[in-house]
Image (cartoon, rainbow, N blue to C red):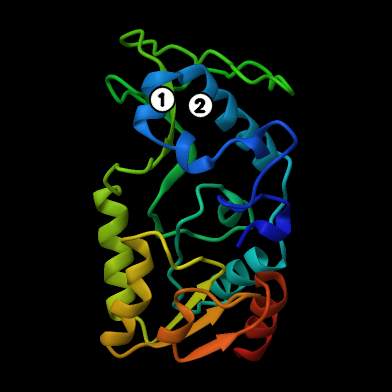
């Protein structure tokens, strides 16, 4: 969804420094315990990229549909805030939120100011929690962690109630979120996949729309009156 805004997909590499690291090896609690400075530096780079990005036409189209009163629920695996910056209401960030920083020890929210981004730094010490002195971590769901219960409940409820489900730009590999389209289809929804490439989900939807978010979603919004 955010690739056309310049935000790399989770498996899509990064800059010259971070492209040599496997994201699936960094986005774990074990990696945090082993080398929190490395993990935090990677997430500071991701924050920097997101802060420098702008919502694309796909984000804007969904926000416009909501503004026009279309009953559109958005459940996203993306951890960025581009939907919100486009003016949309997100019902569920099922994989957490990049900027919802919290203490890794006591879970207290972090309300401090982060130091400026240090370009090219491979290790950066995380800030410390004002409540307990623990290290502050990003508010994302790492591999092996449970999804936020409230967000997951809202996403499942929306999938079960939907008449139309549009799946935008996901690989269809990461469970349990990848199971939502099938859940919706089994409940009677018509499921459309929007993706420039076929995915693991493609054989299990009603229509595969071979397009990007920034081209397909504005066309969809224009067709809905």
Q: Which mark is residue 183?
A: none
Q: Which secondary structure lies at badge 2? A: helix
Residue at left offset 72%, top offset 76%: 215
x and y, in percent, of residue 14 in the image: 68, 42
x and y, in percent, of residue 119 in the image: 74, 23
| Mark 1 touches mark 2? (CB < 8 Å) | yes
Q: Is residue 12 above or below residue 98?
A: below
Which residue in the structure is indicated by mark 2? 39
Is 58 left, or right, of 175 in this rendering?
right
Residue at left offset 35%, top offset 12%: 134
**Label 1 to label 2, Cα distance in Å?**
6 Å
Q: Is residue 51 above or below residue 171?
A: above
Residue at left offset 33%, top offset 79%: 182
Is 217 in front, or is 23?
A: 23
Q: How many marks?
A: 2
x and y, in percent, of residue 99 in the image: 51, 35
Residue at left offset 31%, top offset 61%: 176
Q: Which mark is residue 32?
A: 1
Q: Is residue 38 above or below residue 45?
A: above
Q: Which secondary structure lies at badge 1? A: helix
Packing grade of label 2 (10 A; few <14, some 14-19, many >=20) is many
Q: Is residue 126 above or below residue 93?
A: above
Packing grade of label 1 (10 A; few <14, some 14-19, many >=20) is some
Res 59 quadrant in image? bottom right
Looking at marks 1 and 2 on the same chain, the residue that comes earlier in the sequence is marked by 1
């Amino acid at each position: 969804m955010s690739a056309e805004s310049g935000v790399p997909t989770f498996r899509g590499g990064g800059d010259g420094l971070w492209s040599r690291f496997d994201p699936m090896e960094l986005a774990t609690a074990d990696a945090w315990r082993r080398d929190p400075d490395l993990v935090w530096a990677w997430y500071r780079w991701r924050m920097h990229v997101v802060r420098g990005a702008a919502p694309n036409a796909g984000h804007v189209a969904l926000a416009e549909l909501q503004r026009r009163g279309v009953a559109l629920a958005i459940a996203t695996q993306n951890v960025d805030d581009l939907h919100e910056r486009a003016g949309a209401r997100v019902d569920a960030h099922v994989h957490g939120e990049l900027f919802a920083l919290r203490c890794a020890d006591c879970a207290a929210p972090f309300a401090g100011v982060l130091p400026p981004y240090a370009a090219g730094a491979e290790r950066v010490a995380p800030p410390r929690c004002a409540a307990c002195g623990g290290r502050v971590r990003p508010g994302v769901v790492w591999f092996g962690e449970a999804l936020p219960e409230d967000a997951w409940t809202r996403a499942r409820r929306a999938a079960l109630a939907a008449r139309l489900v549009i799946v935008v730009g996901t690989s269809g590999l990461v469970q349990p979120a990848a199971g939502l389209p099938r859940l919706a289809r089994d409940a009677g929804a018509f499921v459309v996949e929007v993706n420039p490439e076929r995915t693991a989900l493609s054989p299990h939807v009603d229509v595969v729309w071979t397009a990007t978010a920034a081209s397909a979603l504005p066309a969809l919004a224009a067709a809905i009156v």
